[in-house]
């Protein structure tokens, strides 16, 4: 079995690395130094974040050991447990231990319930959170940006007013309340969708990656998954080289002109055909897939609604501003069709500030994920954190929050770099 | 309106550039443009009629706020809300542009009438490469041209304008102001438009770059028989470059004449004031003439001649009735003008 959560992580980091290398190789010297600085800066940033988490945990009121012991427990026993956990060491020793452990991927061991390594628990829960967060973010972006752009195009007309008011309304609803209401209507009243969880317990499904959508599509060998992955992320982008190749190596001739345009397209069609052929060899677990999707709908909608208001308003405001720009008016004066002016020229320029907002909203997205997971008993990192807090399981909360911090730091870094990469004006 | 391009007129025609002879390329008739404002409609262009001839460089001057840009945009029907062309005809090549549906009008913009905007810094899309701009401009109007062919034309064009073809791969911010303005000309020329409207196109350039830019415009006009409408508040540029000059005041034409006549024998008191207030380096520290008053508020303009409150020679009739824009004949000892000399002033018209 090639397809595991671990291999997925390695694959994604590999892709990110490739992208960074590409950007460094292709970018201007200033972009290059920006990327390198930004990547290097992430290290102290993560360090500060985990330090804050550490300090925060120390100043929290309540004693984790006493609180889980019955009153009147032998104080020597308590002392022995404290010693075992290293809680009686001076704080700087604890801090050094914490940091060195973290570097080795050791986040300590739960002190409540089953005493399992926190890192192991995170590895188990992270896929669920990812399965919730990524589709929600995509849904939110697609919905938010398109309706924001549409509203801007209909500035001051009824659709604009409706979208604007709708965005404020949605934005002002607390996320857990929204989740509860959706549950009430669609699960309890109408009975269309399951109330909670990721998959019904009676559905058999082998969990390789624990990202259930992937598991139910790629039920057996991960080979297909890897092939599809490579074809889509490496093969498709390669179709862009043909224009350059033809221009450089073939003589000026009508047929090479034809090739220049069509070689790339043929390449894409071939890749897509291959993907299609591979997909024929898949044996998806349809029942599981359907079940998983049904479980995903409500949490996904809840989480994306929580953030969509910001994106609608930002896209709209930016777009209205962009549509006033001289270059937009100049494009119209050149006879560029209105649709192209709005949805290509203006939207492309609007997209850049939105990208920074995505970076800024990642933290809020994860916070929303914690709330959503709690509402829908979605067994991800959020639920793990909540349980950890309720049980005063020190290491678990500390490790969980630190993991979130690292995730946020990395995503923000990627967004910043992508922003610099896309916007030709940025020069650091 | 026709899809086919009319062939550039022959050299023979060009020699008549200064004359009002021949069929005008564009005839503007009774043009009214209004902006809806909170305090009522603002009449930015009022009952304006004007002929534009092929191959001429027509200077359009006047204080700022007198409606020059509005007129320029109106010629392409590019007035954005809250503005609106409320009345008038724009007869271009035999067709009234005002009667065209928007989709047909779009085919005129950029292909037959183009515009060079004031600020080359902001008039190019910052995330679009220079070649993409030009290729798009060509292919929007002629989709049958392949990208490769369009690019080849872009290279030709940009080299003609004195920019290296390598620059095509740059983004706008990588070019200097002068280069960007030349790119703007390139965009305007990409489809060999008949009329190019340059609205304060040199305002943001330094003097030397400006001079080069103006030379280039003149060369291109001579080479391609372009018709250029040069909107500016810089009288010097007009004196240097224009064949004919239109002086606008408060949304109306005050005076039209060929450049020599206008500068040497201005008739309208406004033109006279305007010319006197041009700084001149030869002057030995004389106080610059400053025209009294300021342009009127166009929401509630003065009745009669809109200039009368500021006019040193105003008569009772001036406040009561608007004069016509009528031809004047040269006074004693003045040479015959090269083209019709029109003045919008009671001083030169009979009245009871
Ligand atoms: N978008 C607009 N809304 C309201 N009034 C406008 C607008 N644009 C221009 N105007 C008014 O129209 C008049 C003419 O403006 P404009 O054509 O820009 O003059 P110029 O180019 O000669 O400086 C001015 O009085 C100006 O205030
Ligand atoms: Mg202006």
Image (cartoon, coloured by chain):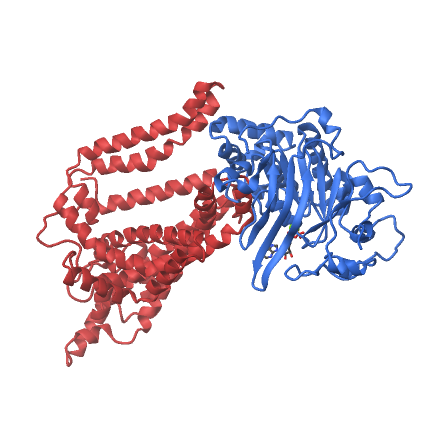
Chain colours: A red, B blue
In the rendering, at what x and y percent does residue A143 appear? 34, 52
Q: Quick check: B348 above or below B111? A: below
Q: Quick check: A415 above or below A62? A: above
Q: Residue A402 lies in what quarter of the image?
A: bottom left
In the rendering, at what x and y percent does residue A359 appear? 40, 55
Residue sitting at 37 percent across and 50 percent down? A146
Judged left or right of residue B154, residue A146 is left
Q: Residue furthest right?
A: B333
Q: Residue furthest bottom?
A: A72
On the rendered image, what quadrant is the N terminus of chain A found in? Answer: top left
Count numbered badges in the picture: 0
Judged left or right of residue A407, residue B306 is right
Q: Quick check: A354 above or below A64? A: above
Comparing A151 with B48, the one in front is B48
Residue sitting at 41 percent across and 23 percent down? A259
Judged left or right of residue A332, residue A13 is left
Q: In this view of the protein, can residue B101 be seen by the observer?
A: yes
Comparing B15 with B280, the one in front is B15
Comparing B28 with A151, the one in front is B28
| Image quadrant, ligand 1 | bottom right
Judged left or right of residue B164, residue A376 is left
Q: In this view of the protein, can residue A41 be seen by the observer?
A: no
Q: Residue furthest front?
A: B352
In the rendering, at what x and y percent does residue A380 appear? 22, 58
Q: Quick check: A204 above or below A225? A: below
């Amino acid at each position: 079995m090639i397809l595991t959560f671990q291999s997925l992580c390695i694959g994604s980091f590999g892709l990110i690395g490739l992208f960074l290398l590409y950007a460094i190789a292709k970018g201007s010297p200033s972009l290059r130094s920006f990327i390198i600085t930004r990547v290097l800066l992430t290290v102290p940033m993560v360090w500060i974040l985990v330090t804050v988490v550490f300090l925060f945990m120390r100043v929290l009121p309540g004693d984790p050991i006493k609180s889980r012991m019955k009153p009147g427990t032998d104080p020597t026993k308590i002392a022995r447990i404290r010693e075992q956990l290293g809680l009686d060491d001076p704080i700087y020793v604890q801090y050094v231990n914490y940091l060195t452990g973290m570097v080795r991927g050791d986040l300590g061991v739960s002190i409540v319930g089953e005493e399992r390594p926190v890192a192991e628990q995170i590895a188990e829960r992270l896929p669920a959170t990812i399965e919730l967060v990524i589709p929600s973010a995509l849904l939110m972006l697609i919905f938010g940006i398109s309706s924001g752009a549409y509203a801007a195009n209909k500035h001051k007309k009824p659709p604009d007013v409706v979208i604007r008011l709708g965005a404020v309304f949605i934005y002002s609803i607390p996320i857990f309340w929204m989740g509860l209401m959706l549950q009430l209507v669609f699960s309890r009243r109408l009975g269309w969708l399951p109330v909670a969880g990721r998959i019904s317990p009676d559905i058999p499904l082998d969990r390789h990656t624990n990202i259930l959508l992937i598991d139910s599509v790629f039920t057996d060998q991960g080979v297909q998954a890897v092939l599809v992955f490579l074809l889509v992320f490496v093969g498709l982008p390669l179709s862009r080289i043909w224009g350059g190749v033809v221009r450089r190596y073939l003589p000026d001739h009508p047929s090479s002109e034809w090739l220049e345009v069509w070689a790339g397209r043929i390449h894409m069609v071939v890749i897509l055909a291959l993907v299609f052929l591979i997909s024929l060899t898949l044996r998806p677990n349809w029942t599981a897939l359907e079940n998983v999707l049904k479980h995903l709908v409500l949490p996904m909608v809840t989480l994306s609604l929580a953030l969509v208001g910001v994106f609608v308003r930002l896209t709209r405001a930016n777009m209205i501003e962009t549509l006033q720009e001289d270059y937009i008016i100049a494009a119209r004066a050149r006879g560029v069709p209105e649709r192209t002016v709005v949805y290509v020229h203006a939207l492309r320029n609007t997209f850049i500030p939105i990208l920074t907002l995505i970076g800024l909203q990642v933290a809020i997205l994860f916070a929303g994920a914690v709330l959503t997971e709690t509402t829908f008993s979605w067994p991800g990192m959020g639920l793990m954190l909540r349980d950890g807090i309720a049980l005063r399981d020190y290491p678990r909360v500390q490790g969980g929050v630190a993991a979130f911090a690292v995730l946020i730091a990395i995503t923000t870094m990627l967004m910043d770099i992508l922003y610099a990469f896309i916007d030709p004006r940025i020069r650091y | 309106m026709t899809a086919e391009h009319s062939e550039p007129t022959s050299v023979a025609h060009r020699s008549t550039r200064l004359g009002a002879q021949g069929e005008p390329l564009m005839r503007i008739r009774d043009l009214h443009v209004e902006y809806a404002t909170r305090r009522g409609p603002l009449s930015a262009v009022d009952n304006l009629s004007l002929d534009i001839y092929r191959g001429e460089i027509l200077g359009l001057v006047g204080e700022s706020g007198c409606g020059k840009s509005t007129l320029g945009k109106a010629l392409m029907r590019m007035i954005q809300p809250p503005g609106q062309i409320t009345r008038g005809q724009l007869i271009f090549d035999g067709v009234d542009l005002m009667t065209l549906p928007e989709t047909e009008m779009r085919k005129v913009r950029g292909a037959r009438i183009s515009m060079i905007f004031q600020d080359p810094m902001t008039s190019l899309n910052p995330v679009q490469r220079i070649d993409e701009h030009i290729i798009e401009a060509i292919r929007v109007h002629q989709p049958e041209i392949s990208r490769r062919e369009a690019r080849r034309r872009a290279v030709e064009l940009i080299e003609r304008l004195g920019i290296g073809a390598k620059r095509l791969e740059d983004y706008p911010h990588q070019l200097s102001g002068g280069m960007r303005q030349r790119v703007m000309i390139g965009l305007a020329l990409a489809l060999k438009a008949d009329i190019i409207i340059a609205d304060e196109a040199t305002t943001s350039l330094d003097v030397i770059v400006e001079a080069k830019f103006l030379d280039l415009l003149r060369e291109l006009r001579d080479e391609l028989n372009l018709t250029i409408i040069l909107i500016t508040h810089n009288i010097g540029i007009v004196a240097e470059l224009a064949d004919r000059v239109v002086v606008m005041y408060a949304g109306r034409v005050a005076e039209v004449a060929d450049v020599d006549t206008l500068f040497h024998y201005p008739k309208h008191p406004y033109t006279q004031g305007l010319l006197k207030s041009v700084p001149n380096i030869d002057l030995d520290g004389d106080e610059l003439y400053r025209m009294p008053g300021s342009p009127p508020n166009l929401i509630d303009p003065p009745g009669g001649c809109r200039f009368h409150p500021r006019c040193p020679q105003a008569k009772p009739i001036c406040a009561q009735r608007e004069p016509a824009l009528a031809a004047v004949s040269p006074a004693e000892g003045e040479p015959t003008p090269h083209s019709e000399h029109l003045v919008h002033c009671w001083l030169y018209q009979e009245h009871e």
